[in-house]
Image (cartoon, rainbow, N blue to C red):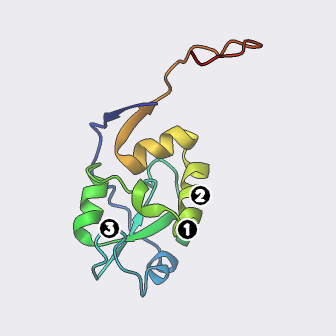
Amino acid sequence: MERQRSAQGARSGFAASSAQKAAMEGECCLVCWQLPVDPAHLIDKSVAPDPSGDPLRVVPLCRRHHDEYDSRDLNLLPYLLPSWRQQLGLAVQVHPGAIVGALNRITGEVWAPVAQAPEPSGVAMLDA
């Protein structure tokens, strides 16, 4: 897949639910391990509404990194695995663009499939 920087980005202005805030208690920022943290929605509520305030829809980020993520200037993908796998899986599930849409949002980059030539079938490749 090829990647390009996304031109999108702005704070969504959606507040976290009480359950989402409670889920962040005792957590530090995924990126810098600092306190205090905000519950940061992996997928914007404007893209995938979250009427129940599911705690698995947020991860802990300090204000600086939350702002960077909302501005599409922070790639969270390296920080999510393995500890935040459930949140990542749910992000893929709820994003209307599925895995590509979730990757676009979480990395702040635009991902697009790249066509590849099909492998020849039934032909053995020999090393010279």
Front in this rendered view, residue 116 or 51: 116
Instruction: Please determine whether, in this image, residue 32 is positioned above or below residue 106.
Output: below
Picture layout, residue 45 above or below residue 120: below
The correct choice, above or below, for 40 with respect to 5 in the image is below
Whether the residues at callouts 3 and 2 have beta carbons within 8 Å, the answer is no
Q: For the residues carrying marks 3 and 2, which lies nearer the camera in this image? A: 3
Q: How would you rate the neighbour count of disc 1 (Cα within 10 Å): few for under 14, some for 14-19, many for 20 or more?
A: some
Identify which residue is drawn at 52% across, 51% down: 48
Q: Of label 1 and label 2, which has the lower sequence position? A: 1
- Residue located beneath label 3 in the image: 31
Q: Which residue is mark 2?
A: 90
Residue most extreme to the right? 122
The percent coordinates of residue 126 (x first, y second) are 64, 16
Q: Residue at x 41, y 51 (%)?
A: 106
Q: Picture quarter containing residue 32? A: bottom left
Query: Label 1, on which residue?
Result: 56
